[in-house]
């Protein structure tokens, strides 16, 4: 079994066992990843309370990006079915997303915002995850 298939199976199992939606499993993973970084920063430096603000901000931004990604998937499906999108500029979503995340990454490195850095990495990997998920679960 490949790593990709294993990840999909883990999410499927969590959804089934805990009666969750895919986005809820994704949100939990993001929160736990960010919380681990924030907790580690508190333990190492004692300066972690600000990281929790970053955790909250990144979790909210992830939720927004998750919805935007699903809307993009629907628009792609509409284009395949009808040949024309309802929202003409939807194709720019991925480009703008990558540009903003790249800028945020540089900024967060410079200011030492570690939870936010983890968030950027998760965001950049999220598109790949959704494509993988859709390979096993078409929209």
Image (spheres, rainbow, N blue to C red):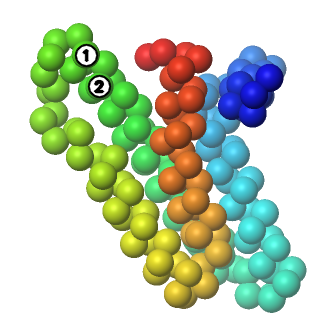
In the rendered image, residue 79, in percent from the top left (x then y), is placed at: 21, 20
For the N terminus, the quadrant is top right
Q: Residues within 10 Å of mark 2 (few under 14, many from 20)?
A: some
Q: Are marks 1 and 2 in contact (CB under 8 Å)?
A: yes
Above or below residue 97? Residue 72 is above
In the rendered image, residue 119, in percent from the top left (x then y), is placed at: 58, 61
Left or right: 78 as drawn, with respect to 4 = left
For the C terminus, the quadrant is top left
Look at mark 1 in the image and give the residue it sits on.
Answer: 80
Left or right: 122 as drawn, with respect to 67 = right
Left or right: 51 as drawn, with respect to 130 = right
On residue 76, the disc is 2
Q: Quadrant of residue 109?
A: bottom right
Q: Residue at x 74, y 68 (%)?
A: 37
**How far is disc 1 from disc 2 in space, using C-alphas?**
6 Å
Left or right: 130 as drawn, with respect to 72 = right
On residue 41, the disc is none
Q: Residue at x 36, y 54 (%)?
A: 97
């Amino acid at each position: 079994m490949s790593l990709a298939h294993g990840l999909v199976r883990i999410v499927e199992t969590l959804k089934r066992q805990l009666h969750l939606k895919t986005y809820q499993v994704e949100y939990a993973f993001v929160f736990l990843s960010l919380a681990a970084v924030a907790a580690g920063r508190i333990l190492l430096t004692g300066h972690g309370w600000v990281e929790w603000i970053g955790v909250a901000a990144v979790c909210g931004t992830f939720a927004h990006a998750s919805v935007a990604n699903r809307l993009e998937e629907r628009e792609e499906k509409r284009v395949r079915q009808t040949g024309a999108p309802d929202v003409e500029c939807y194709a720019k979503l991925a480009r703008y997303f990558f540009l903003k995340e790249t800028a945020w990454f540089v900024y967060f490195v410079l200011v030492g915002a570690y939870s936010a850095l983890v968030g950027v990495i998760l965001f950049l990997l999220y598109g790949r995850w959704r494509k993988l998920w859709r390979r096993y679960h078409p929209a």
